[in-house]
Each structure stands twice: as C-alpha cells, then as structure tokens.
Amino acid sequence: MSGSPPKPEISLRLLEIFDAMMRSGTTVEAAEQLGISQPAVSNGIRQLEAQTGVTLFERLHRRLQPTEEAVALHEDIKPVFGLLRGFASRAQDMRQGISGRLRVISTPPLGHTVAPLAMRRFLKDRKGVSVAYDVRRLEHVVEAVQSGNADIGLALGLERHLAVNIEVIARTHMVAVLPKTEKSVESTVSAQTLSRGDFIGLEIESRLGQMVRAAFERDGAPYNPRVEVRYCATAAVLVTAGIGTAVIDPYTAAFNRSIGIVERSFLPPIEVPAVLITRKGVPRSRLQHAFISEMRRALSDFQASGLQTGSEGSLRDEG
C-alpha cells in the first residue's frame, strides 16, 4: 500500500554488531571480537535501535543489559550467525588445505600403484578432506582436466599437450618382465632377445605401446606380439600365466612382482616420464599443492627403493 511506511533496511553489519553484543555483554568485548572500535559498536547499536524502533539495551549498574525484545530478536538471528561462523571456519580450513574436496584422475600405471600411496599420506592428517578418484585411459584423463571435471591428472609418457599444462615430476625407464620360470640370469634383456620368443605387446594406439614398438625398431628387432593388450597390468598378469614376456612401466612391474614375474632392465632404454596434468589458466589450490607434494615424495621413494632394478620388497609395505 502506498501509505505504508518503508521497511527498515537493516544491514548484516549492524546485525553482526548486535550479535557480538549479545554474546559478549560489553561494547569493549564486542569491539575486540569484531576488530572495530568501541564507539563503532555503540553507534551501530544506536543505529539498529533507530531503524527497528525497538530498545535493545538498557544501562544497568554501568553495564548494558539486553531487553526482552533484544533476547527474542537475537533468537531469530542466532542460526544465521552460526552458519556464517561455520562458513568462515570452513573457508579458513580450505585456505590452510585441511578441508575441501580434491578430484584426481590417473592412467592405470600410476593410478594403481604409486598414486594410492600418495593419497594415503595426503589424507592421513586431513580429516576434513575428501577425494574423488578415477582411473581412466589417457585421452579421458586429459579431457577431464581440460573440462574442469578433475583438478589433477596423472599419466606416463606425455610431455606436451596444447590443451593442458604438463609438468614432468619423475623420470624412469620401461622394464622387461619375464615369468619366474624363465631361466635367464642376465641383468638386462634386449628387444632382439624378446622378439625370439612369445611376446606380449601393448596396443599400438597407446602412447606406451608406440614407445615399445619404436624401441624394437631401433634395435632392428621384429615387433610381432603373440598377444596384444591395452594395459601394462594386463601384460603383467599374462606374463605370470607363462604366456610370454613383456615390456611395461616399472611401477606396474614393482607392484606385480609378488604374483610371479621377474623384472630386468630393457635395452634399448625407453625413458618414460611421470607427468602432472593441470588445467590452463587456473591457479592451484592448497589441496592441489599438498597432493602434488605427496605424489613427488611417493615417486622419489619408489626410485630410492631400487624397485625398478629388480630388488626385493614392495612399496605396499611402506609405512
């Protein structure tokens, strides 16, 4: 109705001053809570009383005593400030990297081996953090990071890409894996040697498969896999079954040694970088930095342990 008086426009700041006064009881304490001056608190209360037309505090024995109306009004706004304090606390936890959600996607060689170790360490002291974790093929990893559906991607063998940022976080070499029944005691195995027996190859459409085939060609060895598979882990299982030999990444080899394979250095060497994939133009959060740090540490531990050269032990047992 045109004759109705306009509703007072009460700012959140005035309500914040009122809430602080109700919780502390003095203008001095309220000012300290809010980080403002004592006169600013007094002025805020007077302004709120003027806008509402309600007396909120009365002076009693040199203290401001809340009126019954103030108590009733404060009950109405208490949930709001509880939410705001929770929001501020959660935001602070996010800034400090101890709360929030991280989305990680990886190709199988890292996703099924070193990355879970990094994740366990990452989550250990971050009770307020959750992780969305997926293991997919390389093209899906890149697509997820580029579209913003994942914060961090992990992969092997990819050193450049126009659509995403690529950062090498470790370098190692592909290895030859043989059944434990294999009589060879040589510390290295060549492409020529592997080509003379039953060989399990990685599909040529994959980046690692292309790298293995190129190594055979460099050695002048025919590349004629008896069986061709998509993943290094599948190749390791087939080697265990005695179907043939294979060349796979050292992470998969180390984590599958206990199921019955022998690992040897492969010639000619195939250097394979472990890479971090992030979205272009997006700054990294504290959670991302923390997980990346743990991933670097896990890869460093792997290399320091000597697992890629065939020593006994497993990162599964690392504490």
Image (tube, rainbow, N blue to C red):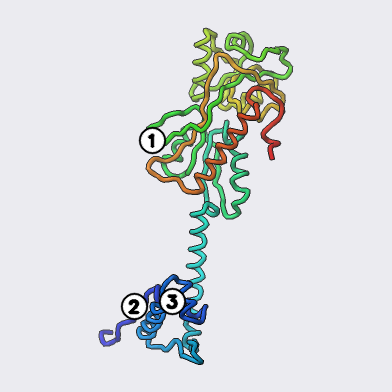
Q: Is residue 30 above or below residue 264?
A: below
Name the residue tied to disc 3.
17
Q: Is residue 50 above or below residue 180?
A: below
Task: List x then y, in percent, for residue 79.
Answer: 51, 73
Upstream in the sequence, badge 2 or badge 1?
2
Name the residue tied to disc 2.
9
Residue type at mark 1 is: Ala
Quarter of image, res 53:
bottom left
Neighbor class of circle 1 (other Cα within 10 Å; few <14, some 14-19, many 20+) is some
Residue type at mark 2 is: Glu
Q: Residue 90, which numbered label?
A: none
Q: Is residue 81 above or below residue 213?
A: below
Quarter of image, res 194:
top right
Q: Residue 163, which numbered label?
A: 1
Pointers 2 and 1 in contact (C-beta within 8 Å): no
Q: Nearer the viewer, mark 2 or mark 3?
A: 3
